[in-house]
Amino acid sequence: RTSRCAHADPNLGQVPAHTEYGARCRACYMPTREDWLQVGVDASGLEMRMLAHYMAPYDGGAFAEVVLKGRREDGTDIHSRWQKLTGLFYRDSQKTLTYAMLYGAGDKKLGYTVIADHYKAFEAGLTDIPVPALSTARDIGKQVRDRLLSGEEALGKLIADVKHAWKSGYIVGLDGRVIQCHSQHGALNDLLQSAGSIVMKWAHVLAYQGLTCHLGPHGSEYAFMLHVHDECQMETKPEVAELAGSIYAESIAEAGRRLGCNIELAGDVSV
């Protein structure tokens, strides 16, 4: 529906990472050829960059500037900036609330995140204000949503326009394709998910072309292992690992340029 790959049978998009069995599950993925290295490339902050792309017509690229240049260390990154708007105690709580909102969460769910944040802060002695009752979650969620959208006007305008477009039964994807939307509250999520998926499909095609040009046929110096959501895993000969990674990372940036993204895209390489 959103053009996102299914990654099913098995569901490779849900392999644990930080849970009890995360390390053991991830250890199952390794090069199939002796002495070859595994090279991973992730699209850097893809969802936030896609959001910045769509917000650019409303704010002239101001949000994109924050996404690209903001730093957690000095509180200028987007999550820290939005934390100041919502008044949450913890940055991690803000990240949870941010993505929940973008994924279409309702006021009640947002309120639960705020209450959980307050409870954690209360237990840590950061506030002596009593923890709000769970029954107030919906009202709290609406208040925090309104504060965020009031402080980030471009986001509010984007959401309003996406909801209006949803009434036609579909929205237009990054490359002009039709994206069917099942619900109004999830329309923005459909838009962002489809955009990220389209970018990664373009990047994979461009990477294949670049790798073939520089390293020869697939399987000779490199081979693809996994392509899951916003990342690709390859196996390569040791002497070409860095080159293969840089080619794929550049392909992500090139995909953004070809698709007319209003923000520079990039990839993070790990060998």
Image: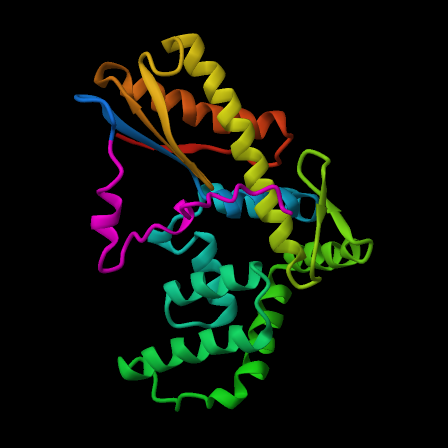
The C terminus lies in quadrant: top left
Say if residue 144 shows up in the picture.
yes
Q: Residue furthest left?
A: 35
- The residue that appears at 73% across and 35% down in the rendered structure is 176
Outermost front residue: 9
Q: Which residues are magenta?
A: 1-30
Which quadrant would residue 154 be assigned to in this image? bottom right
Magenta segment, principal secondary structure? loop
**Residue 73 at x, y = what percent?**
33, 52
Coloring scheme used: rainbow
Q: Note whether residue 264 is visible.
A: no
173 magenta-colored: no
For residue 181, what is the image quadrant? bottom right
Question: Number of numbered discs present?
Answer: 0
Q: Does 29 appear in magenta?
A: yes
User: Could you say where residue 118 lies in the image, as x and y percent from the top left?
Assistant: 39, 80
Q: Nearer the viewer, residue 150 or 6?
A: 6
| Image height of 57 relative to 134, above or below | above
Q: Is residue 198 left or right of residue 266?
A: right
Q: Is residue 50 left or right of residue 75?
A: right
Q: Foreground residue, 72 or 218? A: 218
Q: Nearer the viewer, residue 203 or 227?
A: 227
- Position of 34 with respect to 252 (left or right) is left
Q: Position of residue 100 (x, y in %)?
A: 51, 63
- Residue 166: image location, x then y, percent: 76, 56
Figure check: 110 above or below 16: below
